[in-house]
Image (tube, helix red, strand yellow):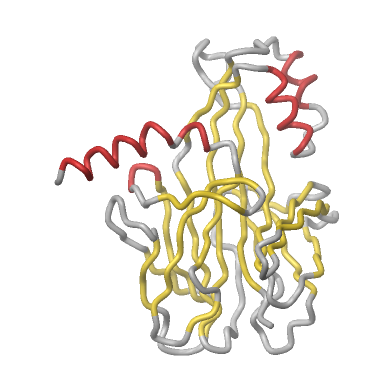
Amino acid sequence: MKLSRILLLALFGLTAAPVAAHEFWIAPESYQVAPGSAIRADFKNGQEFKGNSLSFFDRSSTRFDLAVGDKITPLTPRNGDRPALDTMAPESDALVVVLHEKASATLTYREWAKFAKFAAHKDFANAQADHDAAGWPREGFKERYSRHVKALVGVGSGEGADQAYGLATEFIALTNPYAADFDGQMSVALTYQDAPRADVQVEVFDRAPDDTVTISLHRTDSGGKVTVPVTPGHDYLFDAVVLRPAADAGSDPAAPVWETLWAALTFSVPN
């Protein structure tokens, strides 16, 4: 391995943690491709649907698959590959679902205000009170986080359907934005441990062709579903977070006290 590549890998390891609190998503180079052509996509980390492209590293990936209906194909990029996804599309029309789950990592909250802001933004009204009731410190405490993301790519006509693929927390597209009869209403189900997440916040990032991004907040219904009107020619990121006490909280002063699981879904709406 060349020295420059070794330094690159080391730099990635040093810089990954500070940006990890932001959204993470899969960004296809093109959300619609011809049958038999290349599907390429970057891992993205950032805010407001704008971010840095990250390379693939197997140490930080617990699952990376391409799914078409019930057929699931594991993806095996090399360490350091960017784009992280570079594979061939099916030879026939299909809705391709890219699935990725990242290994857990930790971050440290050195200021209480940052945790309070995060909890309020992600709609966890009781988090601060629960934290204090547990007797956890307000400074220097840790959070463990993981990512559970999907992207929808239309191959040819894009006909097909998403389904539950067993992610720890998961958006499931109930409508197909590439289908000929799509009516501009994007319906999704949100799950956690395979059960519906009822009455929780879904943050929607809407990027227009001029790269301006509009953010709106929505809530799932009693069945864990939400329908969001979407616009032709726009790209979308749906984001939702689970916040729970870490299973090992209190076992050691250095152990995380909170754990977050981030679900994301990206897609585009054809003109």
Could you tell me which residue is drawn at 48 percent across and 69 percent down?
29
The answer to whether 48 is drawn above or below residue 91 in the figure is above
| Lateral position of residue 181 relative to residue 156, left or right | right
Q: Between 249 and 233, which is closer to the camera in this rendering?
A: 233
How many numbered marks does the figure carry? 0
Quadrant of the frame with the C terminus: bottom right
Q: Quadrant of residue 77?
A: bottom left
Q: Position of residue 210 (x, y in %)?
A: 67, 67
Could you tell me which residue is drawn at 54 percent across and 30 percent down?
144
Could you tell me which residue is drawn at 75 percent across and 14 percent down?
132
Could you tell me which residue is drawn at 74 percent across and 39 percent down?
122
Q: Between 209 and 133, which is closer to the camera in this rendering?
A: 209
Q: Between 165 and 109, which is closer to the camera in this rendering?
A: 109
Q: Between 137 and 246, which is closer to the camera in this rendering?
A: 137
Q: Position of residue 54 (x, y in %)?
A: 43, 50
The answer to whether 125 is drawn above or below residue 216 in the figure is above
Residue at the extreme front of the image, as rendered: 210
